[in-house]
Amino acid sequence: MARTGALYLLSYNSLQSLGWALALARVLSSYFSTKSVNGAYAFAGDLICFLQTISFVEVVHAAAGLVPSGVMLALMQWGGRTHFLLAILRQIPEVQGLPSVFITFMSWSMTEVIRYPHYALSCIGISLSWLTYLRYTAFIILYPIGIAPGEMWLMYQALPFIKERNLYADFFDRLSISYYHFVLAVLICYPALWLKLYLHLFKQRRSKLGKHQTKKKV
């Protein structure tokens, strides 16, 4: 059973590695083809939406004990990105060409072309020191860039369109709150949630890189 689980995780992480490598190539291609940062969604939006949506299985992995990640942490990360992509970006064409999309997609793609290969190799007992270092270091720069000038700024720019169209009114009317005010609340809570996840990643970094250095000395 353990061997089957490892083979499954190897396959999943390998496919995600390939998918995000293609996404990164498409985002870069959008820049070099158009000489602007406004075409990222047109070039890579559908692929990134697909990759992010199917990554819900990572929440299932955590719940089933296939990986040591916490279920709530995995769900928060998946939910935040998926809401940004499917509920806002995909539904509002006017924001799809904004620079914030390019910033977000670059940050996510660069993060995932490091993270998934690291996970895939760990499934077969391979640990590359440089990849481990990147896995637990690149987030220091990529995470704040993806969050502030990326996700948060785009959600803020989307607010007038959300309010004008009264998006998802049928659902939110039952909750006595508009989707516009829901997104405002999300934006207010984002810094606190972001800081919690960011500090958690630093804790992971100390743990993982400390263990890696100990193994190298041994």
Image (cartoon, rainbow, N blue to C red):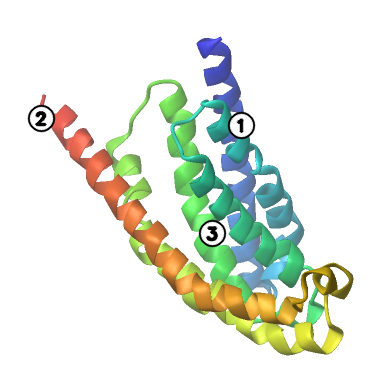
Confirm whether residue 110 shows in the render: yes
Report, in whole angstroms, how far the alpha carbon at label 1 lies from the one at label 3: 18 Å
Give the mark nearer the N terminus: 3 vs 2.
3
- Residue highlighted by disc 1: 12
Would residue 128 be found to the left or right of residue 39 on screen?
left
Report, in whole angstroms, how far the alpha carbon at label 3 lies from the one at label 2: 33 Å
Q: Residues within 10 Å of mark 1 (few under 14, many from 20)?
A: some
Give how far across and how far down residue 194 sits, in percent.
44, 65
Would residue 160 be found to the left or right of residue 22 on screen?
right
Would residue 21 be found to the left or right of residue 125 on screen?
right
Farthest right residue?
170
The image quarter in which residue 185 lies: bottom right
Q: Is residue 116 above or below residue 38?
A: above
Q: Is residue 106 above or below residue 129?
A: below
- Residue highlighted by disc 3: 108
Q: Amino acid at mark 2?
A: Lys
Q: Amino acid at mark 3?
A: Trp
Confirm whether residue 42 shows in the render: no
- Residue closest to the eye, 48 or 81: 81
- Residue highlighted by disc 2: 217
